[in-house]
Image (tube, grey):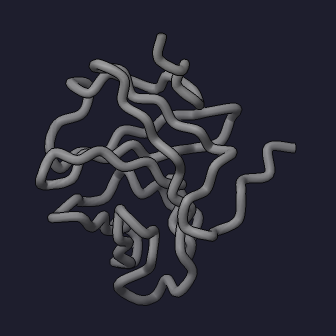
């Protein structure tokens, strides 16, 4: 028997189009679940590290998401800022795909950014 997936069931693989981001709340914490240009799925904090703006409203190109507010860009794999004015990374979360289901674990940050304070 396979291990149960870790994290919360957030969507199905087909709920997200290529180059699209979906905003999900896990314990009131906003998460961007993003399908990049190659069809890979990523999960990261949905708030730009420069300003309090949702990244899911921005454009996805390649493996990068751009904040519509001031043009900051973030690598979907590492959360690293690629374009100013942001200079701090956004958290990247552990993600598992089981069949068609996408699970995100916001207690496991994979890029060294701060774990969300869920109070």
Residue 80 in the image: x percent, y percent?
A: 45, 77
Residue in front for this viewpoint, 118 or 13? 13
Residue at the (52%, 25%) spot, across then down: 5
**Outermost residue, right direction?**
119
Residue at the (36%, 83%) spot, across then down: 82
Residue 95, placed above or below residue 75: above
**Which of the 4 image quarters holds residue 63?**
bottom left
Residue 62 in the image: x percent, y percent?
A: 16, 64
**Outermost residue, front direction?**
1
> Quadrant where the C terminus lies?
top right
Residue in front for this viewpoint, 113 or 30? 113
Residue 117, placed above or below residue 74: above
Residue in front for this viewpoint, 37 or 51? 37
Would residue 108 be found to the left or right of residue 103 on screen?
right
The number of discs equals 0
Residue at the (56%, 61%) spot, across then down: 91
Residue 106 in the image: x percent, y percent?
A: 62, 44
Residue 51 in the image: x percent, y percent?
A: 56, 71
Residue at the (44%, 48%) spot, across then down: 43
Would residue 106 be found to the left or right of residue 17 on screen?
right
């Amino acid at each position: 028997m396979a291990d149960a997936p870790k994290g919360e069931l957030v969507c199905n693989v087909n709920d997200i189009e290529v180059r699209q981001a979906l905003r999900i709340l896990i314990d009131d914490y906003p998460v961007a679940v993003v399908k990049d240009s190659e069809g890979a799925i990523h999960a990261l904090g949905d708030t730009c590290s420069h300003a309090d703006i949702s990244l899911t409203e921005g454009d996805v190109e390649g493996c990068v998401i751009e904040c519509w507010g001031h043009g900051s860009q973030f690598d979907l794999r590492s959360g690293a800022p690629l374009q100013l004015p942001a200079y701090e990374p956004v958290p990247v979360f552990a993600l598992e795909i089981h069949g068609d289901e996408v699970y995100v674990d916001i207690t496991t940050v994979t890029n060294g950014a701060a774990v969300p304070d869920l109070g």
